[in-house]
Image: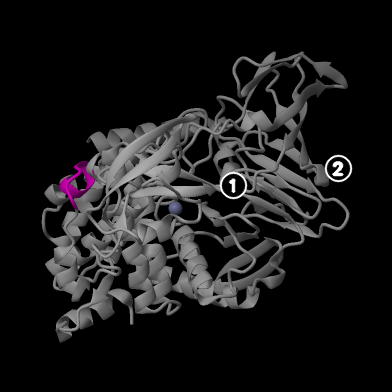
Amino acid sequence: MLHVFFATLAVSLVMTRPAAAQAPEPIRYTLRFPAPQTHYLEVEAVFPTGRRAQVELMMAVWTPGSYLVREYERHVENLVAAADGKTLAVSKPVKNRWRIETGGAASVTVTYQVYGREMTVRNNWVEAGFAMLNGAPTFITLADEAPRPHEVRLELPAGWAGSATPLMPVAGQANHYRADDFDTIVDSPIIVGNPVVKTFEVDGKQHHLVLEGDPALFDADRAAADVKKIVEAGKGVMGRLDYPYYFFLNMVVESGGGLEHKNAFLTMSSRYATRTPRAYVNWLNLVGHEYFHNWNIKRLRPVELGPFDYEHETYTKGLWIGEGFTDYYGALLVKRAGLSSSTEYLGELSNTIDQVQMRPGRLVQPVDMASFDTWIKQYRPDENSLNTSIDYYSKGASIAFMLDAKIRKATGGARTLDTAMRQAYQRYSGAKGYTLDQFYAVMSEVAGIDLQPWFADVVSSTKELDFTEALDFYGLRFTPVDPAGARATMGASTRDDNGRLVVTVVRRGTPAHEAGVNTGDEILAIDDVRVRADGLTARMDQYKVGDQVRLLVARRDRLVTLEVTLGPEPGRPWRLQTRPDATAEQTSRLSAWLGQ
Ligand SMILES: [Zn+2]
């Protein structure tokens, strides 16, 4: 009865509001590069006003996927508004908004310049030969509005051949695109210049690998062939490709990183990324990670991650799934695609586990709170971060590894984490999103056991992770490299600051921490003999574990003497290896997992 009532109401609403079916008039942007070598982009935007006396414009202060308020408006200059040939009054009510007195005009034209010289996946870069643009730092939009199309037309400087972006092209017009709403334009990077583009098809869908920057040394053909295998491996996990097309936008530059989008990703990699096996696998792992996001976080997300408030922090406790599970699958897709060996894969997973287990902050911060506080911690690391916080990428990936084994074990190998992710996708993808309890329920349902108490332990507490079950299931063990106790150490990280030996990080629980060594201390001498910036390792070789040394440091320009009792170097205890005595059953489970 209730259902019928709502159905009738919905129909009558649609019938009595025909205006709702009409798309609002678009905002039209023209982007120009009159002097790209100065790193400036010129934006002209025509905003429909609906004949209101005043309109308010807004610029995003952060961009989804990169959880820090970045104050993009700081790179905006010379914002001027005009209508019907007259300049209009503009005021700023807050840091990222502009109020325009329209004088009753039907539309206002706003021009502004954007400085773009940050080579990161969340900002802009403009130079003589190309531009890399992101939505949040580029497009000022109408504030407090219902979704409205945003159109972008690019005017290219001489010598620039074209553009590549997941934005929908406007038919018949080169370098002219349309987004249904502001979310889409924020979610769509634009590469302009002379990009190298390699296209391949999977499932009838076009995939474009786009290289810009300095791709001369980058083996584009080989990369495209291998990225295709990663797409196929991804489809093997999630069962379907839900995008209309996909752009792998890869800047070949001197920085790194990646950012996911719904129908694309933007990554940065070295010009030498395809030149050595190790660098190449690392690049493929990055591709696997950012690509897997098209399912995990862009279409299947914690409920809080959309629709976005672009002017304030968005808090979620689910990034250990959104990022951690994506990290787990990123490298796994590369392995299953046959692009890395089992040894390489287990080495990567060992590094992940190492990052959790060697971090003192694992005993301080639960991973759900690492997600919640990402705005003030993950994206604002300092010298004490290792002691006070956990990284939701590595801990989330470790949880995924254990969960996958748990589901396989509970179902006799009939179901896996892949099954569970597909089930979660089916139930919660799109506008829905999931709460953590809903996510736990799906995982439990697929496993056929109640996993809620286990999740409470690994996610919401700081208890040590127990890998025993997963290791036993696959016939793996941890085999330490550099066994502990071999070498003596103070346990402080240092750097060479123009010949000065300066302490950078003092981990909790190390001899340096107990002796009161501080971050920023300049180490001058050990046992009254000068130690140079490049000589600490050699000097430590003169001692053994348990020796007490007298450390002379300069701290804020005063000389301080500290007594330090040297401890053992921790070595690398978390190296995964297959057990030599693994049973045939364990070996076959390992193969089923890694896709051999
Ligand atoms: Zn990610």
| Amino acid type, label 1 | Asn
| Amino acid type, label 2 | Pro
Q: Does the magenta stretch include residue 508?
A: no
Label 2 environment density (alpha carbons within 10 Å; few <14, some 14–19, many ≥20): some
User: What is the x, y in percent for residue 323?
Assistant: 39, 51
- Chain part drawn in magenta: 457-464
The residue at the far front in this view is 528
Name the quadrant containing residue 568.
bottom left
In terms of secondary structure, where does tag 1 sit? loop
In the displayed structure image, the side of residue 461 where residue 278 appears, left or right: right
Query: Relative to the observer, which residue lies in front, 200 or 391?
Result: 391
Which image quadrant: the N terminus? top left
Which image quadrant: the C terminus? bottom left
Q: Residue at 61% across / 63% down in the picture?
A: 270
Residue 389 seen anywhere in this rendered image of the structure: no
Please say which color scheme the image uses: one colour
In terms of secondary structure, where does tag 2 sit? loop
Mark nearer the viewer, 1 or 2: 1
In the displayed structure image, the side of residue 524 where residue 448 appears, left or right: left
The residue at the far bottom in this view is 584
User: What is the x, y in percent for residue 143?
Assistant: 59, 25
The answer to whether residue 202 is above or below residue 312 is below
Residue wearing tag 2: 34
Disc 1 within 8 angstroms of ligand 1 (CB): no
Label 1 environment density (alpha carbons within 10 Å; few <14, some 14–19, many ≥20): few
The answer to whether residue 373 is above or below residue 579 is above
Q: Residue at 16% across / 61% down in the picture?
A: 447
The disc label shown at residue 498, or none: 1
